[in-house]
Image (spheres, helix red, strand yellow):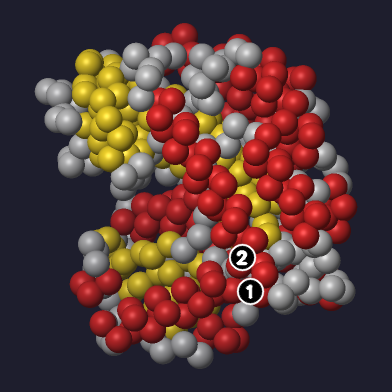
């Protein structure tokens, strides 16, 4: 019996796929394996990599070297996005015995030594989970991207957009509910493309409506769905109607904005939406959701971005009810169109602009947390035995004490008491059964 350890870099989809592979290895009757709690204990280390930024690749190299230094006898397998675009370089890292491309990653479900079958590949890779080592379960509903934004390497690493059949999503959530999970993060690489490859003209909002129909009668108020990242182009009348009718979707989601300037968005290959459309939708949604957690991705210093164009991004942040943000200085990725664009912005300017965006977002975050303190109660998911949790609005919380019957993954109605270092201290009122 081998002992293995997994390490995941990057997105929630990587987390999900790592968990699926670990379950498959641990449950393989023919070649059973045991999952180790640390890399030091493992015979085999699986690293699921990210390549979305230069920093992600640097983190990968550092992690592999650290694993080899701490456990030189362990064999290291690298898979994921970086393995897709730079396999030869990764194969030379110390301790690495195999590099498995993103497209061949599903073969790992058959075991560490399995090779990709010559059989026709399924439209949607057969990853699935029945449990999780986290309090909140990621549910993968879509993979790949066919859009090719000029700055983004993901279409090269994950391939074209594919959608998971709705019945499979429903079955997985049913399994996870039975295992005690009460929050489900509906995730994909590009949720705007959900429905591609499925019968009928379906989109992501049809999936939400289906999940509401399947689960809300029994689980509304007792479990919840969290939408991961959506694009402003998805914020349609249909989106509003589905969200307005929802009894299970958290009053929070994350917008893939990238810029507040139309010309920069066009240069990014993202002219299919306008910044103003996001502002108008959030104003409309705010009329029925008076408290909303809203995050956003923003890139500072894209090639050709002028001071005036950057100020348009600053103004968009002011106009939106943002409560947190993921702010990145532009990072060149080999193989993307943006690398060849003229008028590159100096790296110090990119970092300075990103810093200004972060400071403005942090001001809005503080105001939002202060607002939450005035609510009568919030529903908090218990994330560990130290009393840490997360509210429906995606605000970090900590209980004054855990009430009797509140286990990991429980939902607890609680009263906000005070704020400590961006964490809301809450007093438990009742465990939601």
Across and down, in percent, residue 200 comes to 79, 27
The correct choice, above or below, for 346 with respect to 11 in the image is below
* Residue visible at 43% across and 84% down in the picture: 96
Task: Classify mark 1: helix, strand or loop.
Answer: helix
Local packing at callout 2 (Cα closer than 10 Å; few below 14, some 14-19, many 20+) is some
In the rendered image, is residue 202 in sight? no
* Residue visible at 15% across and 24% down in the picture: 403
The correct choice, above or below, for 341 with respect to 189 in the image is below
Q: Quadrant of the C terminus?
A: top left
Q: According to the image, label 1 marks what residue?
A: 348
Across and down, in percent, residue 95 comes to 39, 86
Q: Quadrant of the N terminus?
A: bottom left
Q: According to the image, label 2 marks what residue?
A: 352
Residue 167 placement: quadrant: top right
Across and down, in percent, residue 307 comes to 78, 60
In the rendered image, is residue 215 in sight? yes
Cα–Cα span, label 2 and label 1: 6 Å
Frontmost residue, 39 versus 22: 39
Residue 233 placement: quadrant: top right
The answer to the question of whether label 2 and label 1 lie on touching residues, with beta carbons closer than 8 A, is yes
- Given the current orientation, which residue lies at the most extreme top position? 217
């Amino acid at each position: 019996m081998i002992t293995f350890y997994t390490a995941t870099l990057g997105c929630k989809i990587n987390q999900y796929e790592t968990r699926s592979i670990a379950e498959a290895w641990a449950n393989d009757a023919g070649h059973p394996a045991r999952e180790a709690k640390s890399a030091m204990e493992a015979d085999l280390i699986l690293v699921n990599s990210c390549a979305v930024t230069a920093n992600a690749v640097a983190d990968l190299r550092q992690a592999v070297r650290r694993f080899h230094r701490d456990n030189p006898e362990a064999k290291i397998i690298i898979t994921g996005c970086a393995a897709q675009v730079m396999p030869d370089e990764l194969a030379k890292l110390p301790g690495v015995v195999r590099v498995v491309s993103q497209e061949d990653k599903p073969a790992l479900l058959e075991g560490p030594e399995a090779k990709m079958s010559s059989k026709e590949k399924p439209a949607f890779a057969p990853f699935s989970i029945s449990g999780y080592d986290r309090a909140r379960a990621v549910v993968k509903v879509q993979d790949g991207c066919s859009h090719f934004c000029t700055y983004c390497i993901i279409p090269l690493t994950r391939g074209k957009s594919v959608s998971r059949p709705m019945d499979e999503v429903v079955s997985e959530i049913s399994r996870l509910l039975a295992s005690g999970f009460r929050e489900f993060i509906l995730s994909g690489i590009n949720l705007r493309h959900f429905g591609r490859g499925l019968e009928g003209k379906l989109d992501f909002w049809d999936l939400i409506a289906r999940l509401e129909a399947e689960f809300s009668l029994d689980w509304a108020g007792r479990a919840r769905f969290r939408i991961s990242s959506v694009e402003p182009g998805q914020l349609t009348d249909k989106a509003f109607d589905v969200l307005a009718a929802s009894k299970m979707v958290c009053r929070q989601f994350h917008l893939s904005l990238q810029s507040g300037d139309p010309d920069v968005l066009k240069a990014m290959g993202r002219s299919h939406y306008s910044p103003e459309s996001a502002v108008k939708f959030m104003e409309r949604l705010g009329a029925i959701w008076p408290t909303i957690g809203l995050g956003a991705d923003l890139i500072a210093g894209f090639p050709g971005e002028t001071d005036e164009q950057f100020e348009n991004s600053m103004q968009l942040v002011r106009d939106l009810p943002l409560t947190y943000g993921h702010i990145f200085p532009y990072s060149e990725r080999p193989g993307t169109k943006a690398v060849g664009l003229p008028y590159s912005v100096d790296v110090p300017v990119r970092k300075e602009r990103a810093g200004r965006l972060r400071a403005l977002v942090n001001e809005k975050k503080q105001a939002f947390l202060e607002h939450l303190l005035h609510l009568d109660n919030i529903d908090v998911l218990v994330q560990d035995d130290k009393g840490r949790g997360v509210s429906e609005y995606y605000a970090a919380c900590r209980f004054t004490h855990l009430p009797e019957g509140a286990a990991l993954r429980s939902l607890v109605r609680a009263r906000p008491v005070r704020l400590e270092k961006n964490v809301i201290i809450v007093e438990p009122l009742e465990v939601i059964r």
